[in-house]
Image (spheres, grey):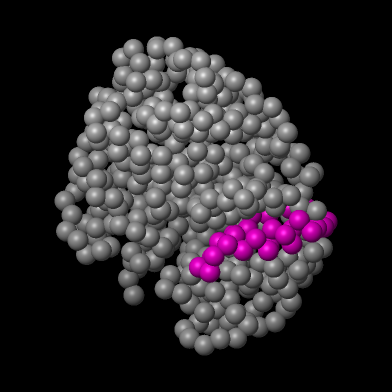
Amino acid sequence: MAEDLCLKLKNGTQLFVPNRLDAITTYVILEQERWFEKEWGFVEHLLQPGMVAIDIGANLGIFSMAMAKAVGATGKVYAYEPTSETRARLEKSKAVNSAGNLDVIGSALSDTEREGRIVFGASSELNRLVDDGQGSGEAVHLTSLDLEKKRHGWGEIDFIKMDAEGEELKIVAGGRSVFEADSPVVMFEIRSETGVDLGIGTAFQAIGYGLYRLLPDERHLVPFESAELDEFELNVFAIKPDRASDLAARGLLAEDGETAVPGDWQRFVATRNFGPVFPGLFDTPVSPGAYADGLAAYAGWRDELRSAGSRYAALRESVDLFETAAAETRDVSRLLSLARAKLDAGRRVEGNRCMVEALQLLGTGQMPKAPFLPPTLRHERLGGLARGWLETACLEVIERNRTFSSYYGPAIEQLDWVCRTNFATYELERRRVLSAVRRGQNVQLRKDLGKPAPDHLNAEAWAKLIG
């Protein structure tokens, strides 16, 4: 067996992972230097020093390490990972991160104490828990949250992350005392290989919880509405009113009911660097109407001095206004702005579809004739030549948003061209190379991936991979 890799992540933690590209976590970290779920980045904002958190279904520990870092030496994290080989790697990660505040527990959680079985998947992320079963796997001990709290003498629990491959409803049943007494914030998965399961949300609502989802900015929780469920939404947060009020006061949660107030579009543009890419364009007054109002509403969403509720109301308003404007005139500027607002609002499929349409218009020679929202936050501060800047920006968005990782599908053909330009990031090059290598294709490097850089942390591992 090849020696495990120890990979660095953007949040300053390290993780031991299997030394093979068919392992999902290995591939994703080599590609993105983080986990692909946006909730991973939210942990450092949600958790505070001294808090107590539980990671149910810790797997290799990518959330556990982030949680341990966030709660600090005065806090505590309990990571439940029943599979022995995976848990051994988690223990090594605990040691390399000096995470003395992390306890790794070799049990699975359910509704009662009993014996069960883990059936192994092709990658450890795909392991599943059954009461009995055949195939490759191992016997495991099952227990419940309420029993574990008594056994370990825990104090108040602040946060629970659940990724239990279908066992979530039983975990809720086995943790009623914890959920009633401690009111922890709970993050749970709603998607599996068989589709969407909203039953766990209903179970939490029955015991006084409200449901929220995280916006892609990784800073704001907003009310969850199943009718607007994007197919890339993997997780939902269950939060009781007292915790919700605290998170709202910290600027991390937006409640319904606040009014959308326009922002100052010209001031917003003046603080960014993308205006000079199109000389004079962003000084051009926008004709009164839905599009001008959409730009002002978007500027309101980006005003960090406002409450989370006010900002989210402005974002929703901007989406509605841009949709109206694009229905009136379907040009590059309006499609780019509609795409950006929808992506910010977590409407990833719709946003990417608009970005593809904008790119197609650019391909016909059409260029923006009115101010517009740049495709990403990165491009708000990135100058360059107009055509190359905008086309590569659109392609970057399309590639990053069409799937969670190139592990799940080959990179777009145009990515090779993007990586020949000065606008390409190390992550795009890693994505291009990994996609080719995993599929047995020859690939020519556009960047020296064997050399470390501020946004390329695992050069040593890459040097071995590319030989």
Count of numbered tags: 0
**Is the residue 266 above or below the residue 78 in the image?**
above
Q: Is residue 187 magenta?
A: yes
Residue sticking out furthest to the front: 328
> Looking at the rendering, in which quadrant would you find the N terminus?
bottom left
Would you say residue 337 is visible in this rendering? no
Question: Camera-side residue: 234 or 89?
Answer: 234
Question: Looking at the picture, how far across and down is residue 417, in whole percent?
Answer: 21, 42
Question: Camera-side residue: 111 or 276?
Answer: 276
Q: Is residue 126 magenta?
A: no
Q: Residue at x 63, y 58 (%)?
A: 188
Question: Looking at the picture, how far across and down is residue 415, in whole percent?
Answer: 26, 46
* 113 to the left or right of 321: right
Point out the stretch of residues depicted in magenta: 180-207
* 334 to the left or right of 2: right
Q: Residue at x 49, y 59 (%)?
A: 93
**Is the residue 393 above or below the residue 85 in the image?**
above
**Is the residue 407 above or below the residue 395 in the image?**
below
Question: Looking at the picture, how far across and down is residue 309, in whole percent?
Answer: 67, 32
Residue 318 sits in which quadrant? top right
